[in-house]
Image (cartoon, rainbow, N blue to C red):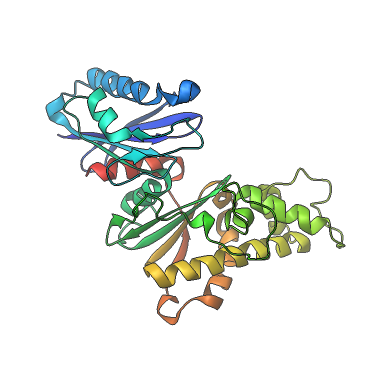
Amino acid sequence: MKYCFGVDIGGTTVKMGLFSTEGELFEKWEIKTRTENEGKEVLPDIAASVRSKMEEKGISIEDMAGVGIGVPAPVSEEGIVKNSANIGWGYKNVKKEMEELLPGVCARIGNDANVAALGEMWLGAGKGCSNMIMVTLGTGVGGGVICHGQIIAGANGAGGEIGHICVNYNETEKCGCGKTGCLEQYASATGIARLAKLRLAKPHEKTILEGKNMSAKSVFDAVKKGDRIATEIAEEFGAYLGHALANMAVITDPERIVIGGGVSNAGPALLPFIDKPFQEKAFFANKDTKIVLATLGNDAGICGAARMIL
């Protein structure tokens, strides 16, 4: 039997999984992401954890297909990161360094959102598809585009950065990227909370959101209770996201659009707010594209990282 490791680097923890090359997940675990000193210990810590698990399971270098790694930054096809916001790296040849730390082991590197999309296509909500878009709605908005089974990374590894499509040309507040009007400002968890605060600052009828610690969860909890103001906020969020996805669909023609990230924990109640505006703007050839919830949760990254090796 051949084995591979799937690794998903986050700002706080590194998620790791041991897989067979047939896709069976044997074990998963986490280690701390040591971001101090420009994150110089991140890769050595991963390599040490891989070696430890190989020794524990009696896995030799000959038994190894490789190690796949998802990184929270644009990654070139050569496995090079030029900058990263959350783990302290500047320029880093991640593939080269990882293969030096684990002699004889092949390493494949990808952007974390792209890798999560690959995981959902392989073992999750996109199973059976070869053309798919995944959107992750968390603190920010990430995305991955897969065409004919391959991640679209682009020239600089920034392919699929859905969160930075401009959806509001009149916006004056800046997104975290420094531009204005990005999808992330309206469709992320923080973006939904922002929309709620802006709505409640205007004249409004009574709402159970009044006095709440505003969050995407509180908005969708109120939606489920029939709150009219919360529903208006959800409709605004959905219009931004649904229209952006219609634009994406006419470029990539996906079979399925998968919605993941923390906001997707709202469950099926989320989908009509996205699907309706999507259908309003979708090109006729994209009308049958299904919008579904991700199913792998936090395992999408390690599954997709392993899939890169296979």
Say whether residue 171 is left or right of residue 23.
right
Q: Where does residue 7 sit, x and y in percent of width and height?
A: 35, 34
Rendered residue at 55%/67% (across/down): 242
Say whether residue 47 is left or right of residue 82.
left
From what the image shows, is residue 276 above or below residue 22? Answer: below
On the question of residue 198 being in view, the answer is yes
Q: Where does residue 27 sit, x and y in percent of width and height?
A: 33, 30
Rendered residue at 33%/39% (across/down): 80
Looking at the rendered image, the quarter that the N terminus falls into is top left
Corner quadrant of residue 276:
bottom right
Rendered residue at 58%/57% (across/down): 182
Corner quadrant of residue 151:
bottom left
Q: Where does residue 264 sit, x and y in percent of width and height?
A: 55, 52
Corner quadrant of residue 240:
bottom right
Q: Where does residue 69 sit, x and y in percent of width and height?
A: 33, 37
Along the viewing direction, whichever of 111 and 8 lies nearer the viewer: 111
On the question of residue 34 being in view, the answer is no
From what the image shows, is residue 182 above or below residue 288? Answer: above
From what the image shows, is residue 174 above or below residue 291? Answer: above
Along the viewing direction, whichever of 28 and 73 lies nearer the viewer: 73
